[in-house]
Image (cartoon, grey):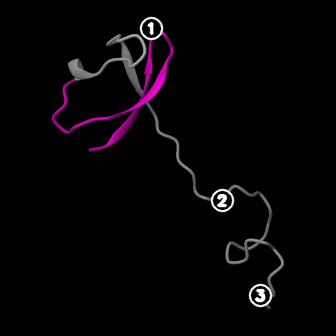
């Protein structure tokens, strides 16, 4: 079952929810205010590269002798 991120259009609460394949929209509601006026928001992800340096990915410290 996939986990989706949602935002409540009434109270602004953002939350994640495990949603079954056969789940209908009527089952989904805000965890804070119980409103059904929610929208699914795009998921964010990380590539694992939090550095903007020019070091090689095979040498995370930038001090490896690669040559």
* Residue at mark 3 to residue at mark 2: CA–CA distance: 20 Å
Q: Position of residue 17 (x, y in %)?
A: 36, 32
User: Between disc 3 and disc 1, whose residue precedes?
Assistant: 1
Q: Is 31 left, or right, of 63 in this rendering?
A: left
Name the residue: 38% across, 36% down. 4
The stretch of residues the image draws in magenta is 1-24
Q: Residue at x 46, y 35 (%)?
A: 42
Cα separation, mark 3 vs mark 1, equals 55 Å
**Position in image of residue 9 (x %, y %):** 44, 12
Q: Which residue is mark 1?
A: 10
| Residue 43, above or below 52 | above
In the picture, the quarter occupied by the N terminus is top left
Residue furthest toward the front?
A: 32
Q: Which residue is mark 3?
A: 66
Residue at figure coordinates x 80%, y 91% from the top left: 67
**Residue 5 x/y as whole percent:** 42, 32
Tell me, yes or no, whether the highlighted magenta stretch contains residue 7: yes
Q: Residue at x 52, y 42 (%)?
A: 44
Which tag, 3 or 2, sits closer to the chain's start?
Answer: 2
Mark toward the start of the polypeptide (1 vs 2):
1
In the rendered image, residue 18 lying in the magenta stretch gets the answer: yes
Secondary structure under the numbered disc 1 in the rendered image: loop
Q: Position of residue 43 (x, y in %)?
A: 47, 39
Badge 3 marks a residue whose secondary structure is loop
Q: Quadrant of residue 38?
A: top left
């Amino acid at each position: 079952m996939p986990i989706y991120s949602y935002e409540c259009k009434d109270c602004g609460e953002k939350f994640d929810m495990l949603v079954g394949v056969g789940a209908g929209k009527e089952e989904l509601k805000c965890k804070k205010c119980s409103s059904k006026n929610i929208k699914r928001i795009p998921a964010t992800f990380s590539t694992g590269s939090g550095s903007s340096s020019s070091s090689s990915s095979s040498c995370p410290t930038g001090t490896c002798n690669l040559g």
